[in-house]
Image (spheres, rainbow, N blue to C red):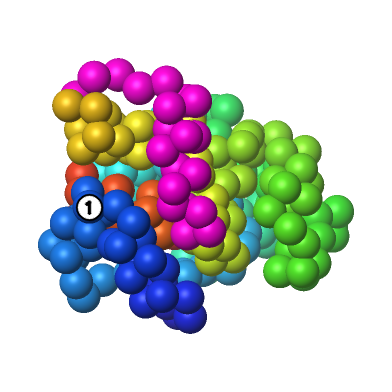
Amino acid sequence: MTPAYWLRAKRALARRDAVLAGIIRAHPRIALVRRGQPFKTLARSIVGQQISVKAAESVWNRVLAVAPEASPEQMLKARRRLFACGLSQRKTEYIVDLARHFADGSIHARDWPDMDDEAVIAELIQVRGIGRWTAEMFLIFNLLRPDVLPLDDLGLQKAICRHYFEGARVAREQIRVLGANWTPWRSVATWYLWRSLDPVPVEY
């Protein structure tokens, strides 16, 4: 499902930011699409931490071979086989811990659509292996929140360096200031900046 706000956000960003206008024009027929249940989205985000998109996809496909539905129950049953899928020991522990949180009801996924961004982040980061970046990816890809700016995302940093600072390194505060111009559509701006590096969207 593509967010209802997408077209409105694209037009607003293109009017405000010439760089984004060019990137948006270059990617006319694709948009953010929600895929997967909350647990699956979070588990896949853990898999993708600190590795390339291509490597994460390869590992995730092997995880799906032992847990095809990627449900909490399947992950718990397959926990002894996850390490052999290419996950580190630590990521294996994180996914198992996440599955336990979902299975025992100690995480309140049904409430998240009615909670604000920071409240969702605060709950998620209580789970081992989920930091702010993973929580922000969840907000963007699963809850389809429109105004998330993931300052620690390497892809966003790289795209901003390339398009706005002639390749020079950029500080978090500079990204924050630049992103203020994109409010309330910072998720959309981030998504298009990712596309400028990799035209094929990551499927969470």
Q: Secondary structure at mark 1?
A: helix
Look at 66% across and 44% down and name the residue there.
96
- For the C terminus, the image quarter is bottom left
* Of residues 23 and 47, the one drawn nearer to the viewer in this rendering: 23
Residue 68 x, y percent position in the rendering: 47, 65
Quarter where residue 38 is shown: bottom right
- For the N terminus, the image quarter is bottom left
Residue 42 x, y percent position in the rendering: 57, 52
Q: Is residue 200 magenta?
A: no
Residue 171: in sight, yes or no? Answer: yes
Which residue type does callout 1 highlight?
A: Ala
Q: Which residue is mark 1?
A: 18
Say whether residue 171 is left or right of residue 119.
left
* Of residues 41 and 74, the one drawn nearer to the viewer in this rendering: 41
**Quick one: label 1, few (<14), some, or many (20+) residues within 10 Å?**
few
Look at 42% across and 21% down and name the residue there.
171
Say whether residue 94 is left or right of residue 126.
left
Residue 32 vs 94, above or below: the answer is below
Range covered by the magenta-colored residues: 167-186
* Of residues 105 and 187, the one drawn nearer to the viewer in this rendering: 187
Residue 7 x, y percent position in the rendering: 37, 76
Q: Is residue 170 magenta?
A: yes
Residue 52 vs 143, above or below: the answer is above
Residue 49: in sight, yes or no? Answer: no
Say whether residue 114 is left or right of residue 40.
right
Quarter where residue 75 is shown: bottom right
Callout count: 1
Residue 65 x, y percent position in the rendering: 40, 58
Look at 19% across and 72% down and name the residue there.
28
* Residue furthest out toward the front: 16
Look at 29% across and 62% down and name the residue there.
14
